[in-house]
Structures are given as C-alpha cells and as structure tokens.
Amino acid sequence: SLQGCATTMWWWAGRVARNVAVAVPASRGVHSKRKIRDMNFKRLRRAGVKPSDMRRKPQPKDFPAPENELPNGWIPPPESVPTDKPFAILRSKNGMLPVYIRYRKEMPFTKVRKVYGSADDFMTELGKITDAKPTQNKSGSITTVEVKGAHVTRVRRWLASLGF
C-alpha cells in the first residue's frame, strides 16, 4: 500500500528533467535480528528472568566424543551395519551421518535424513534422546525426521554409538 507522504523526485524523460511527485510507502516497522534479540532480552528482564538463565544451556555429556571423531564431526563408518535395529540410517556420499540443523523463523530444528525401515521406532528412540517430539516427512521409501532444537552433535554421536 502506498501510504505516507508524497515526495518529489527528478525523472529524466529524454533530455528534459522533470520534477515528479512520487508516493513513498510508509515505514513497516521491520527490525533487524540484533534489535529483536535486544527487545526479547529486555522483555525477559522485565519478567524477572536472570541473565544466567537466558544463556544457551550446554548439552549433557551422555554421549562422549569417540576417540576417532574429527573436528568437522566425521566419525568413521563401522565395519558392518547393525541388523538388530528395526531401522537403518544410510550415510551421505562423503561418509557423513545425515544429521543437519535447519532454522525456521530463527528456531533451530535437527533434521535426520535417509531413515529406512521402521520410522516410528526411530522416532520413539530419538524422542528419548532429545526430550522433544519428532515429526516425519516421507517421500517414497526414504523418511526424513525432524525434531525441535539444536541436537546435531548429540544425535550424530548417538547414531555412531548404535553402529551406523
């Protein structure tokens, strides 16, 4: 909508400059990410929340880093894939576990791709690990599972401990 004041602007038509009135849209009140963060901080402070409670909590060390894990998160694949689980997770082309983080409206979601077999059993076990309810998206025989929160390191180490 073109609300707000009209302003003048030079407009070149051929070789003649003309002064034309142009409608300028009104400000929509869009804030930057930093401004939104500061506004949320002030809102939480007014509500009585301590700054120490606002910091990101460290992940529990229930799945320690394997001794052969590289700094980029790569864990070597096992000699054989486990057959005792009703689901299987296939690795990507470069040998990484297909666990990613995606952001939607500044909210992190952990995404696990290439889930084969019983996705329901995988979702129940993943829900126990992350303390959140996972959702699934199925296309063909491949299932993608998402869970709310940033749990990439924990899920990768858990899958490596299972033998995937």
Image: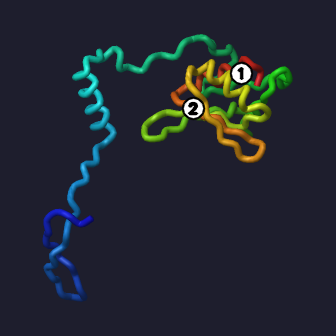
Q: Is residue 79 visible?
A: no
Q: CA distance from mark 2 to mark 1?
A: 16 Å
Q: Which residue is the site of mark 2?
A: 110
Q: Residues within 10 Å of mark 1 (few under 14, many from 20)?
A: many
Q: Which residue is mark 1?
A: 160
Q: Residue 79: percent from the left, percent from the top?
A: 84, 23
Dot 2: what SS? strand
- Decide if residue 13 is in sight here: yes
Task: Identify the image quadrant of the C terminus.
Answer: top right
Q: Give percent across and percent down for residue 116.
A: 77, 35
Q: Position of residue 47 (x, y in %)?
A: 25, 21
Q: Nearer the viewer, residue 12 or 120?
A: 120
Q: Quadrant of the N terminus?
A: bottom left
| Sequence-wise first label, 2 or 1 | 2
Instruction: Specify few, some or many for label 2: CA neighbours under 10 Å numbering under 14, 14-19, or 20 or more.
Output: many
> Which mark is nearer the camera, 2 or 1?
2
Q: Amino acid at mark 2?
A: Thr
Compared with residue 5, is residue 125 higher up or lower down, i.e. above or below? above
**Labels in figure, total:** 2
Give x and y (percent) for residue 135.
Answer: 61, 34
Which residue is at a point 48% across and 40% down the rendered structure image? 104
| Amino acid at circle 1 | Ala
Q: Are marks 2 and 1 in contact (CB under 8 Å)?
A: no
Question: Relative to residue 30, is residue 161 depicted above or below?
Answer: above
Q: Which residue is located at x 67 percent, y 34 percent?
A: 98
- In this rendering, would 139 be left or right of 43? right
